[in-house]
Amino acid sequence: MKFDVVTGNPPYQEKAKGESTKDTPVYNYFYELAEKISPIYCLISPARFLFNAGSTDKEWNQKMLDDPHLKVKYYEQNSAKVFPTTDIKGGVAILYRNENKNFGSIGIFTTFDELNTINQKVSEITDKTLDEIVSNRGQYRYSNKIYEDYPVEMQKISDRRIASNAFQNLPHLFTDEKPNDGEEYIQIFGRFDNGRGYKWFKRAYLSEPNNFPRYKVILPKANGSGAIGEVLSTPLIGEPLIGFTETFISIGSFDNELEAQNAMKYIKSKFARTMLGVLKITQDNTKEKWRKVPLQDFTAESDIDWTKSIPEIDQQLYKKYGLDQSEIEFIEAKVKAME
C-alpha cells in the first residue's frame, strides 16, 4: 500500500511528572521520525528551537538550523492567533523539508527582514559581544559555613544557589535590620511581599562571585514575552558588596558607578534591545540571549558619548554600525523607548 500524504496531530510536549513542574518537549522526535520515513514533510510546532532556545537538545537545534533542505514557511510569535486556547512561549512555526531541494541553511532565524540585515551589518564589525560580561543564572551561592552552622535548615534547601524564595525559606538569616553582633553583613537584593527590596545577610555565609566588590547592572533573568522591542523590567545599579537572588542576573564588573550608569544607558537603548531581540523570543533573559548585542567601551575613552540622552546615544549607535534609513525607521517604530 502506498501513502501519498500522511496527516496527524501528535502532542508537542509531555506533561511534568512527580515533583517536576517542567513539561518535556517531544515534537523534536516527530521531526526526526518524519525525516527518516519521507523525503518531504511539513510540520507545525513550537518555534523556540529556531532561536536555539527552549528545552530541546541544543545539538538538535543547531542541526535543524544548519539543514539546507529545511525552510520556515510561516512563523507567528503570538501562538494564540493560531491556537486560540494555547500559550506557547516563542510562538509557532510551519517548517517544510524537501531533501531534493537546497534552500540554504536557516542559520540565525529572525522574524523580520530588517532585523536580519541589521544583524548581518552589526555582526560583520563586532569582535566582542555583551554576553561576555553577563552573569550566569544563580551566581550568588551559599558558602560551606552556613551548612556547618545551620545543618538542619540547610537540608531543606535544594542547592547552593540563593533561590528566588530564599527570603521566605530562611527568614531568620535574611533580615530587615542589620544585626549588631560584631559580624560583617552585606545586602542581598530580591523579591518579597510582591515587590523588590534588600535583606541583610552574614557575609561569611556567602560564596562571592568576582564582581561582588565592584559595580554592575542588575536586571531580572525573566522579562516580558519575547516580543521585539519590549522594555526591560527596571534595571538598576548594583553597588559593591550587594548581591542578589536567583531572580536576577548582572551585567559587568565596573571600576566606578559612572561606567555602570553608561552600561545601563546602553541596555536601555533601542539599538541594544533590537539586537537582544535576535535571540530573545521567550521571557528568558539569560546570558546566551545577549550574544548578538555588541559590547561597548563604557569608560570616558569610548567612541560613544555616554553623557548624551538615550535617544542621542541611539543615533550614535545607528551611525557606528552603518544602519540605513529603513533599518533605523524599523527600530524606531518597533522598539519601545526607555528612560
Image (spheres, grey):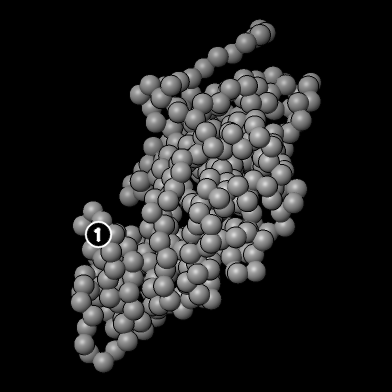
Using the rendered view, name the quadrant where residue 15 is placed: top left
Q: Is residue 309 above or below residue 72?
A: below
Taking the image as shown, residue 229 lies to the left or right of residue 147, namely right
Q: Residue 200: percent from the left, percent from the top?
A: 28, 75
Taking the image as shown, residue 126 lies to the left or right of residue 313, namely right
Judge the density around disc 1: few (<14), some (14-19), many (≥20) Cα neighbours within 10 Å: some
For image coordinates 68% across by 47% down, the residue present is 319
Q: Is residue 161 above or below residue 146?
A: above
Q: Residue 30: percent from the left, percent from the top?
A: 57, 29
For image coordinates 38% across by 54% down, the residue present is 234
| Residue closest to the far bottom | 182
Q: Residue 9: percent from the left, percent from the top?
A: 48, 19
Taking the image as shown, residue 204 lies to the left or right of residue 112, namely left
Q: Is residue 169 above or below residue 65?
A: below
Can residue 187 be seen at all in this image of the molecule? yes
Task: Please name the amino acid that badge 1 sits on.
Answer: Phe
Q: Nearer the viewer, residue 279 or 256?
A: 256
For image coordinates 79% across by 25% down, the residue present is 102
Please give the residue where the numbered disc 1 appears in the rendered image.
Answer: 192
Q: Nearer the viewer, residue 251 or 64?
A: 251
Can residue 63 be seen at all in this image of the molecule? no
Q: Split into 4 quadrants, where in the image is the N terminus? A: top right
Q: Residue 285: percent from the left, percent from the top?
A: 48, 50
Q: Is residue 86 above or below residue 121?
A: above
Using the rendered view, name the quadrant where residue 323 is placed: top right
Q: Secondary structure at mark 1?
A: strand
